[in-house]
Image (spheres, rainbow, N blue to C red):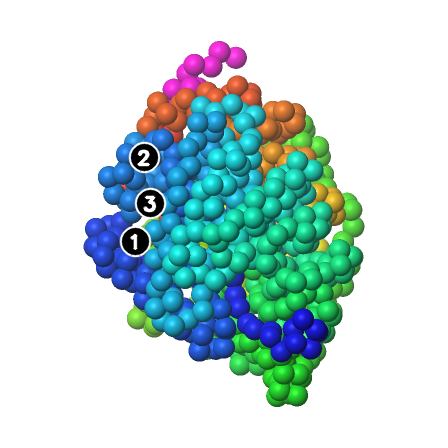
Amino acid sequence: MTAKSAAAAARATVYGYPRQGQGRELKKAIEGYWKGRVTAAALQDTAAELRRANWRQLADTGVHEVPTGDFSYYDHVLDTTVMVGAIPQRHRTAVEADALDGYFAMARGTQDVAPLEMTKWFDTNYHYLVPELGPNTVFAADTAKQVAELKEALALSLTARPVVVGPVTYLLLAKPAPGAPADFEPLTLLDRLLPVYAEVLADLRAAGAEWVQLDEPALVQDRTRAELDAAARVYRDLGALTDRPRLLVASYFGRLGEALPVLAQAPVEGLALDFTAAGAANLDDLAAVGGLPGKRLIAGVVDGRNIWINDLSKSLSTLGTLLGLADRVDVAASCSLLHVPLDASVERDIDPQIRRWLAFARQKTTEIVTLAKGLAQGTDAITGELSANRADLASRASSPITHDPAVRSRAAAVTEADTRRSQPYAERTAAQRGHLGLPLLPTTTIGSFPQTAELRTARADLRAGRIDTTGYEERIKAEIAEVISFQEKAGLDVLVHGEPERNDMVQYFAEQLTGYLATQHGWVQSYGTRYVRPPVLAGDITRPEPMTVRWTTYAQSLTSRPVKGMLTGPVTMLAWSFVRDDQPLADTARQVALALRDEVNDLEAGGTSVIQVDEPALRETLPLRAADHAAYLAWATEAFRLTTSGVRPDTQIHTHMCYAEFGDIVQAIDDLDADVISLEAARSHMQVARELAAHGYPREAGPGIYDIHSPRVPGTVEAAELLRTGLKAIPAERLWVNPDCGLKTRGWPETRAALENLVAAARTVRAELPAS
């Protein structure tokens, strides 16, 4: 096919779409099902209608080929686990009794059975449920979901392409099952898994699929020769099947690198590549391997992970270059649109001019269709769209929001001394112990307490004018008093105020910092039914006034025990926002750190002796390629130290991390120079404690002993046993006792029971320690 005919064939598509619905209908239906208020049939009807609405919207916009199978009740990796029959032994009884309830048991656990481990999906803010595989794993195909959803789309007379997690990525994301050797490599199960994928492909073909997309984002990471050889074998064998649809192998989130020639040479009919800033090198690499003669290329030129409008002229230039490198070039976003909100047009509280800088899923769909039209018919066909796009880009570039000279001058004046505590840890810790007077194995929580319906109603009432500020603040004070009272009675050593005034750990601060924009409807799935509204970091950052001091000092006035001040760290403020793309991340991080530094110093001046600066995103923002780690960690750890280094030696700085694997950033955790770190550890049975010990981590640490992502309440015996496991790695004088994460998603009954058990476990194990 010539470049001209390839252009004429250009069509629009997407890899995936937001699942929740405009009003988060899926979340409400699922949570209603969990509470017994919604039947299984009603939940399934809601899900089916959301799928139909998504497909109709895509088709009406001009998308030629819609995705199927990307919709999920909880997580698409968990759906893959079901599809290949890799149900953990402990969940099989539940799955056999009721497939839907068993599915949710794997995701959330039950009082008697632990859920699957959850961790970050590459370097995004989405979480997946980690497959558990071992030498005895037996795979079996279950294509019911994929086939049914494909048939739903075909019944609407749509061209549909099923989307499935590829076998290489699935195995590389898995972990050894309980009881399997610790060094077991799930990739060794490839020969067992491939026949199952062959059956899946055959069933989808029989159901009417012309193409099937196999997602292999794991191949954009550093991969060994053996892993690349495995990928070559997978697509050689799948490509050789006679009873299959055409295969599209999709990668995203970055450069394919060494995996590109492997896939380019494979006997598959198409590749999907990321050509945004993250994957810009894919263009040169594709040319270097001679392109994709005879194959389809889906070009991801619209950023699927951020919310800024596309530079249409730049993308058209990239697409034009690609025309000579493939038999057919289609246009898409760089990845699934799962990672962005649904529709920017409903954000009526954002200035209309600024709103024109934003592109959520629906706007990105329009951009994709526009680019496909421009590629197929020429730029004359989209003259109006190009003109409006240039005006919007120019408006953003020249806006005073994006450039504050005072902020930039302050950031430029930062010195290395500003990022160092006045005394080394060994001296600080002695001062802190004398000042705080805590026992061995001190108990605390991570920060938030249950966000009750009453609290959400109070915020809604304030926004709607049903109560005034005074009435709202009285409700917040009452909640803080209840949280403090409970913690004192439960016997916790370091208390928190519970954060009742905070809607979200990033949004709360973003709403009080200049340079940020808040959305009203910009919901994005974090995991399961947990949705967040990431703020938009649009310009230079300042802190007009203290953000947390008032409520923290009020809480401290209610108790003689220390109350932690709670802040979100600079890296997490970036990672859990839609960050500006017009300057280096390091520059933005420094601006945020300086604003937070002012808050830390004001908390200390107000009498707060323990200040926690949460950085759960430090690991998740780690670049996918090792070559890029050092530069990122240098500015990320500097930003944390800039935030925290202005306090006295006897002020104890805590940090918190969760949702990720930490073994490969232990040195960076050390470089933060925090006095205490709390980490998610319950589901991994204290793995992180062993990793800290192996590194020789010299500071205090609290590996979590209560998994807050599950409704189950761990008993005292279970919590004590985890604590004893932690003591094998971390000495008692440096070990803290705490949950994995904040408690805002939990209810009060389970929170009370779990924390009382946690304190009892600490007392039990404390009594077992040798007398000093």
At 34% from the left edge and 51% from the top edge, which residue is drawn? Answer: 144
**Mark in front: 3 vs 1:** 3
Instruction: Characterize the local packing of mark 1: few (<14), some (14-19) or many (20 or more) Cα atoms within 10 angstroms.
Output: some
Compared with residue 238, is residue 342 higher up or lower down, i.e. above or below? Answer: below
Magenta segment, prevailing SS (helix, strand or loop): helix
At 37% from the left edge and 45% from the top edge, which residue is drawn? Answer: 142
Q: Amino acid at mark 2?
A: Arg
Compared with residue 97, is residue 326 higher up or lower down, i.e. above or below? Answer: below
Query: Distance from label 2 to label 1 (Cα)?
Result: 23 Å
At 40% from the left edge and 23% from the top edge, which residue is drawn? Answer: 720
Q: Is residue 185 left or right of residue 202?
A: right
Which residue is labeled 2 in the image?
A: 92
Q: Is disc 3 in contact with disc 1, using a CB cutoff of under 8 Å?
A: no
Which residue is labeled 3 in the image?
A: 104
Measured as percent of width and height from the top left, residue 499 is found at 43, 51
Q: Is residue 255 left or right of residue 238?
A: right
Q: Amino acid at mark 1?
A: Glu
The region drawn magenta spans 761-772
Q: Is residue 640 on the magenta stretch?
A: no
Which callout, 3 or 1, points at the residue further toward the start of the chain?
A: 1
Which residue is labeled 1 in the image?
A: 31
Q: Pick whichever, 480 or 532, lies toward us.
A: 532
